[in-house]
Amino acid sequence: MGCGFAKSDQLKKRDRETMRAALLIQRWYRQYVARLEMRRRCTWNIFQSIEYAGEQDQIKLYNFFGYLMDHFTPNNICRNVDWERYFCYKSIEVPELYSGPHLSFPITCSNAAELVEAFKNKQQLHSRYVLQLLGETWRLLRILPNISQISTCHSKEITICGDLHGHLEDLLLVFYKNGLPSSEKPYVFNGDFVDRGKDSLEILLILFSFLLVYPNDVHLNRGNHEDHIVNLRYGFTKEVLGKYRLHGKKILKLLQKIFSWLPLATVIDHKVLVLHGGISDTTDLHLISRVDRHKYVSALRPPKRTRQNRSGMIDSDLEDDDPTSKPVDSSRRRVHSLTHSSSTGSRHEVQRRSLQGLNNRVTCSVEEELKERRRQAGLSQSYGDLRNSLANSDSDPDSGELLESYGDEWKQIVDMLWSDPMPQDGCVPNDVRGGGCYWGPDVTEEVLRRHNLTLLIRSHECKQEGYEFCHNRRVLTIFSASNYYEVGSNRGAYIRMGPDLVPHFIQYQANRATRALTLRQRYVGRTERSALRALREKLFAHKSDLISSFQEYDPENIGLISLGHWACAMEAVLRLGLPWRVLRSQLVGDTLDGMLDYHLWFRELAITEPNTEVSLLETMYKHHSNLETIFRIIDTDNSGLISFEEFRQTWKLLSSHLQTEISDEAISDLAVSIDFNKDGSIDINEFMEAFRLVGGDLLQNEGDPH
């Protein structure tokens, strides 16, 4: 008996030790996962902050890019008959050697399915078919309303997809899991089909083909990236010109027209509102339903007033085409929303096309551009005063009529395409993106109540799980581009919704290798290194501002500051809203008793530096995306080559726009240093190679699994 009790006690002791070990392992694993989650969130914040800062920069320069587009691309053609003549496809021959898909018109469901299969196999559609398909799409879109009304029934569900951003693999996966669009399988695609990814045009052609086959069951909403000025910066313009060198500019011009005719929203069963960005406290669906949406070719610029010139063509001169500007204080990364502020500003007109002539005229400030756009928007309490002052303006007798006619319309459209929800009540300028607003739960409740709606579905923001509820589950964000920032960064998702109007989510990760990654690889492998690389580029671009800020905490000029002061200075200059103290271990190496040698720290950023003056290099890093955009606009023959003289004029154009004094000798030295093959010209690849990070652990991702 005694022996039995002893064995029982031993077993109980062993069980307790086993339980204790299991709890320790569980605690360790939970801490491990928590640390990975913290690092994943930091990585996510880096990507998102840099993305929004880029959009903000785009809005600052929208007028400048608009000028270049107006003067270095074919003139606007506004009459329908002129458009049809200009984009006529009949003279384009399809060679016998062409092995891609052949389309017949009116297009059939089998044609659309064949197009999906062809693009899946990396085939390219001939430019004749592209122009013909786009022309038919344009004719259909012109008869569609601004807000599409659709209904569910007991026999079918509606599928709602968010941003695709050129990720064809995601669209193909959605079709594989959910089925191709049909009368039994209706779809709503909620904007941002293009930019960032490499297959934006293929996505458009697939969606347009199904729209033509099933016009009552396929619905496309416009996103903020369905905008030719945004496309200049984020890749779609480059993609089209690269794939269709001969007819690319005609395709782009026709797509500008198509984008302006895309519907702005969809309403399901009179209860669920689907739009791309969001709403504001002034959103009025009745007004939106009456807007002439095609006038807003770019939502970043108010519509143009049209006049017929002597040749019978239609001139557009409603908007200010002055590209001139001065720099905003480089330490101020946040700007006011494009439509949620008001001020006054001057108006100028630049009519000369030459770069040299423009060089001498680029003197006004970016802030003046924004002031002019805010003034034209006619917002806030000063609307009446602004209207009166514009109406009485001697310099522009039509400006008062312009403000009266277009100010509120333009604001409504920008809000729909650019706004984001926030957790607090109210409606404030979206000073992160620079366009639209942030709106709170109270605004959601009021707008939904006013229009007798129950749910708002929007996209516009990448979510780690592909979707996210907010505002007491009255607002739902859906995002369908997986691996958006980097492989493994996020899932994609789409919604199925039946007559009960309850959303059901299907999540996915389009990249197969991503699903095979371990937890650590998925959260903090390639993705984290990619984010840190982008952040280090951002740091180098603001080197001078950061050193000045560091020196404020270093009155004795010994070159050392505390890590706390380092974190404060980083946020004060970059305004990215990042947890700098958490990121410190990723960005800062060794310290001296908790003090950072900030000059040594910058030297350890490991940026390739061409042999040129630091101020020019730093400015180039800050604006290399803008320079690449200008390159592509001015490269009218689409050769991809820029002569040294074109490079000099391009740089002088942007530096004058930014009021950055740079000598011709420095520009020439820079051109020579990045002409790697020494052929006397600079191609786009050579130019972009000048911005590659080369040092430290950032190259270790080359061998990472995808």
Image: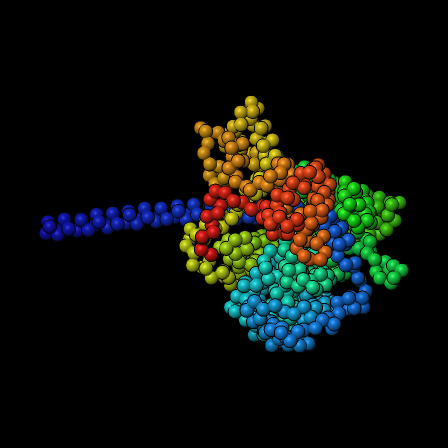
Q: Identify the residue at horizontal 52%, vertical 40% (top origin).
A: 606
Name the outermost residue toward the top. Answer: 556
Say how many tags the image has.
Answer: 0
The answer, for residue 701, to whether it is visible in the render is yes
x and y percent of residue 527 in the render?
49, 50
Q: Identify the residue at horizontal 62%, vertical 48% (top origin).
A: 678
x and y percent of residue 132 in the render?
70, 71
x and y percent of residue 644 in the render?
69, 47
x and y percent of residue 460 in the render?
61, 55
Q: Quadrant of residue 205?
A: bottom right
Q: Quadrant of residue 283?
A: bottom right
Name the outermost residue toward the front. Answer: 679
Q: Identify the residue at horizontal 49%, vertical 55% (top origin).
A: 488
Type of colouring: rainbow
In the image, 153 versus 197, the foreground residue is 197
Q: Quadrant of residue 556?
A: top right
Q: Identify the residue at horizontal 83%, vertical 57% (top origin).
A: 315
The answer, for residue 422, to whether it is visible in the render is no
